[in-house]
Image: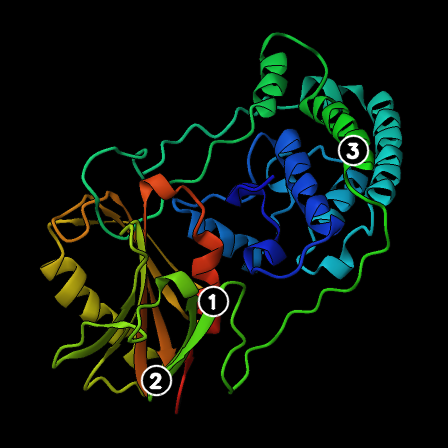
Amino acid sequence: IGTPAYMSPEQANGFPLDARSDIYSLGVVLFELITGKEPYQAETPMALLLKHINEPMPPLSNYRKDIPSRVEDVIAKATAKDPNNRYSSAGEMSADFSEAIRQTGSYAKQTPQMMYEDSPTILPDSRPRLTPPPSTGRASQPAMPAPTAPITGQQSVTQAMTQGSKMPLIIGGVVAVAVIAIVALVVIPNSTPAPINEVQATAGIPTPFASARTIETDQYTVSIPSQWIPPQGFLDLSTDQKLVHLWQPSGLESYAAVIIPKNTILTDAASFKQAAADYTQSYYKTERAADLTLIDEATAPDGTIRQSYRHTGDTETPLPGQVDVFYINRAPQLVIVEVYSADQMGNQLVTTFQNILDSLHVKGA
């Protein structure tokens, strides 16, 4: 399962993977089968990945009040953010889930009114995505396409509920996931996994991710895919008002840029928010208002502000796509990372963009 909707936090971060990453994805599928909804909703792939990395998995009780706690415990353990806190193998998860099914069956017999007649029918989320589908028109600017649709297996479960079946959605979900768990026993190895430890950012030069090189300037260091780097190290688009360094493959279907406005001094969180708002107004809502439309905005736990824009295409970047802008507080400096992916790229660059963000180090901050 490689779409952002089911991607584990370590996969989104580009960390090493083992069977526990598949167990996380399996837990998300189980969550969706029981509730009829994905655990996280976002308008862009990048926003969805950040939620998998940072936000706790919502309790199933938010969607259904009749979920036995034993079933909820299995999902909570399978989708723990730290891989070391998850099931170590599919066999272990399958055994735990089988016991949860057995207890659920006893619970249903004891309380038929709640389990059968009062169990609500939950339909899949049908809200339209704001990001349009890929276009074959002219090349355009930074953009990433919308997340892929929920798995089709969910639809068959809910259809069975709406056709008059007296079995609750949870039983249908349990049976479906039981089959998945059996398949997982064959697909996912049961070897003892090695611990995965997150590497904390350091004050030194970051270690490049796979197929990347570290760019070092007087103001920052950052890792960039090797094939994006020109002979001079970066394309210098700086002006009197800001430093702008850009990297872009020859196909023009993506890019990444580091922007540091000049004469902007950050002193606290309030000045950071004001500086970000001022830059948005003067650049994205003025200079680029004709080709960019804001589709999503969010603030990460560390205060980083992300804005996602729909890019319609222009003469400089003719491929329609999505631009994601990250305002980062590196007091006394405001740092902006802008990334773009054409619709034709799908979700291929989501992890690359996250790696670039993680590798950025601003000197003197």
| Crowding near the residue tagged with mark 1, few <14, some 14–19, many ≥20 C-alpha atoms within 10 Å | some
> Mark on residue 181?
3
Task: Say which residue appears at 63% left-offset and 15% top-offset.
Answer: 161
Q: For mark 1, what is the residue? A: 212
Q: Nearer the viewer, mark 1 or mark 3?
A: 1
| Crowding near the residue tagged with mark 2, few <14, some 14–19, many ≥20 C-alpha atoms within 10 Å | few
Task: Say which residue appears at 69% left-offset and 39% top-offset.
Answer: 26
Distance from the alpha carbon under mark 2 to that under mark 1: 16 Å
Could you say where residue 59 lies in the image, as x and y percent from the top left? 64, 46
Q: Nearer the viewer, residue 164 or 284?
A: 284
* In-image side of 68 versus 4 (left or right): right
Secondary structure of the residue carrying tag 3 is helix
Quadrant position of the C terminus in the picture: bottom left
Could you say where residue 263 lies in the image, as x and y percent from the top left? 19, 86
* In-image side of 191 versus 280 (left or right): right
Secondary structure of the residue carrying tag 2 is loop
Task: Identify which amino acid the numbered label 1 is placed on.
Answer: Ala
* In-image side of 60 versus 234 (left or right): right
| Crowding near the residue tagged with mark 3, few <14, some 14–19, many ≥20 C-alpha atoms within 10 Å | many
Q: For mark 2, what is the residue? A: 217
